[in-house]
Image (tube, rainbow, N blue to C red):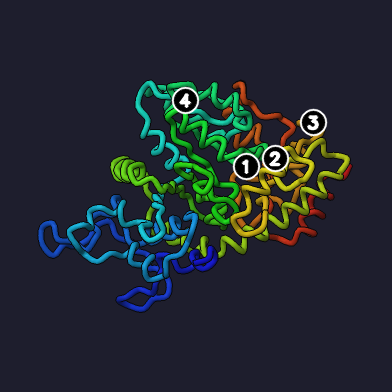
Amino acid sequence: MRFETAAIHAGQDPDPATGAAVVPIYQTSTYVQSAVGEHKGFEYSRTDNPTRRALETCLAALEAASITSGPREIHQAAHPQPSSEVDAPAQLLGAAVGAQALAFASGMAATTTLAMTLTSGQKVVVSDDVYGGTYRLFSKVMSGLGIEWESADLTDPTSVAKALGDQAGLLIAETPTNPLLKVVDISMLADAAHSAGAILCVDNTFATPYLQRPIEFGADVVLYSATKYLGGHSDLLMGALVTEDTELAERLRFLQNSVGAVPGPFDSWLLLRGLKTLALRMRAHSEGAARIAEWLEQHPAIEKVHYPGLSSGAGFQLATRQMSSSGAPLYGGMVTIEAKSEEAALELCRRTELFFLAESLGGVESLIEHPGRMTHASLEGSGIEVSPALVRLSVGIEHPDDLIADLERALAP
């Protein structure tokens, strides 16, 4: 089954009771049992919920390296009949496609749950170009629990090996990175992590499974802030982890239930809706961002443009190889620029009209932000502080000509 079809059908057969074409919102906290211990696959919604299960099945299908199962098989994975094995959802979810997905209340909830697979004395290695929330979690929270952390240039194999050492249990990599959009070699990182006895997690938020599927390159687990492109409409908070490692999936499923940072059924339903148009949206985001990046590269007010699809960029060839899950290379909807100064960067953020000044990214509307004072403010004073002249653009699906005109007005003297 191709990506666009799986996004609409995986886990989403018509409701057998009513014929509803859309997965219902099962807005319930508990489920009636016919007798003690005899239930229909669901007991309590923190543990499992039919809407969330349909979502997790769809996410697993989209991440699978080879989607070959029919709609009925995938639906049965999401809606198993009562049996003695219904208390083992980790083995059922994604079984038809080989991957297992777990949904969380936010991307940081997913990251925190993954971090809880580590034990005191172990180390996590992150990129020296990383989302501020990830830095804050490991430097301010997990460090107090005995989990060490270290940042490294993940484009450099020597730096990666040195940072991993013999204590690392987890390597978390973004590609493209946030906010500089560096492209990281997933296969190289997988080899390095596994040689050091660590697992590799790739934060695939910027690329989405439509453009890049890290498991194909050796990643052990894939992380998403589903708030962003997967949802696509700036109206939900959610995160997800996807893995083909059965043992890791079982550990994560236990933690998902024990910690309880799970999404509600309505947000799960909203994300299912968003996934249906993910392929269409990512094509539009990528095409618009490419045009804008090329235009900005020629603008005299811009010092530098960071975009994986620019042939002048250091990561272009690698991005072309890795970001081609859709059949042809597409490079995503994020563009980061370096203005001449911090003052110029702040003025640009103030003057745009179609680009809304706001944090987050990945919605249908275009956004502009100043990482140093907004999304990456927690990095201030650290060794990985971002430049104050940086401006990050999340290119929406508006007509690129209108967006370019908006930037041209904002950049005018």
User: In percent of the image, x 66 and y 45: which residue is there?
Assistant: 319
Element type where label 3 sits in the image? loop
Q: Which residue is mark 3?
A: 341
Image coords of residue 382 (percent x, y): 60, 22
Of the image marks 4 and 2, the number of the one nearer the N terminus: 4
Q: Which residue is mark 1?
A: 176
Which numbered mark, 3 or 2, is in the foreground of this view? 2
Q: Amino acid at mark 4?
A: Lys
* Mark 2–mark 1 distance (CA, rounded to whole Å): 9 Å
Q: Which residue is mark 2?
A: 315
Q: Amino acid at mark 2?
A: Gly
Numbered label tally: 4
Of the image marks 1 and 3, the number of the one nearer the N terminus: 1
Q: Amino acid at mark 3?
A: Ser
Image coords of residue 103 (percent x, y): 41, 50
Dot 4: within a 10 Å radius of its alpha carbon, few (fewer than 14), some, or many (20 or more) residues? few
- Please determine whether, in this image, residue 197 is positioned above or below residue 370: above
Q: Amino acid at mark 1?
A: Pro
Relative horizontal placement of residue 285, taking residue 143 as reference (left or right): right
